Amino acid sequence: MSPATARPGVEAERLSPDTPQGKALMWREVGDEVSWQTERGTRMRVIVRYIQD
């Protein structure tokens, strides 16, 4: 599991809104399915399970 997709209680990295992942996650809510393409061209997909301000 990568740090950016960690579960609650597991230390996660802060994401910049300027990254592809940060842009994809902006304004999402718990339960949303989010996908984006990495800078290397890999397609990633996650479901938002937890949001902390």
Image (cartoon, rainbow, N blue to C red):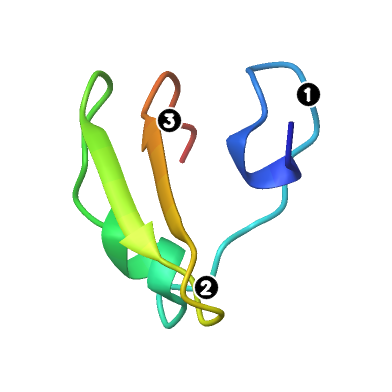
**Gap between marks 1 and 3, in whole Å?**
13 Å
Q: Label 1: how many residues lie within 10 Å, few (<14), some (14-19) or many (20+)?
A: few
Per the model, the C-alpha gap separating discs 2 and 3 is 15 Å
The N terminus lies in which quarter of the figure?
Answer: top right
The local secondary structure at tag 3 comes to: loop
Residue closest to the eye, 37 or 15:
37
Q: Residue at x 60, y 36 (%)?
A: 5
Q: Amino acid at mark 1?
A: Val
Q: Would you place residue 30 above or below residue 36 in this image?
A: above
Question: Which dot marks residue 51?
Answer: 3
Q: Amino acid at mark 3?
A: Ile
Label 1, label 2: how far apart the Cα atoms are: 19 Å
Mark closest to the chain's N terminus, 1 or 2? 1
- 14 sits to left or right of 34: right
In the image, 16 versus 53, the foreground residue is: 16
Q: Secondary structure at mark 2?
A: loop
Circle 1: element type = loop
Instruction: Residue type at mark 2: give it.
Output: Ser
Residue at image mark 2: 16
Crowd around label 2: few <14 · some 14–19 · many ≥20 (10 Å): few
Which image quadrant for residue 48?
Answer: top left
Residue under numbered circle 1: 10
Residues under numbered marks 1 and 3 in contact, where contact means CB atoms less than 8 Å apart:
no
Q: Position of residue 9 (x, y in %)?
A: 74, 16
What residue do we see at 27% from left, 42% from top?
Answer: 34
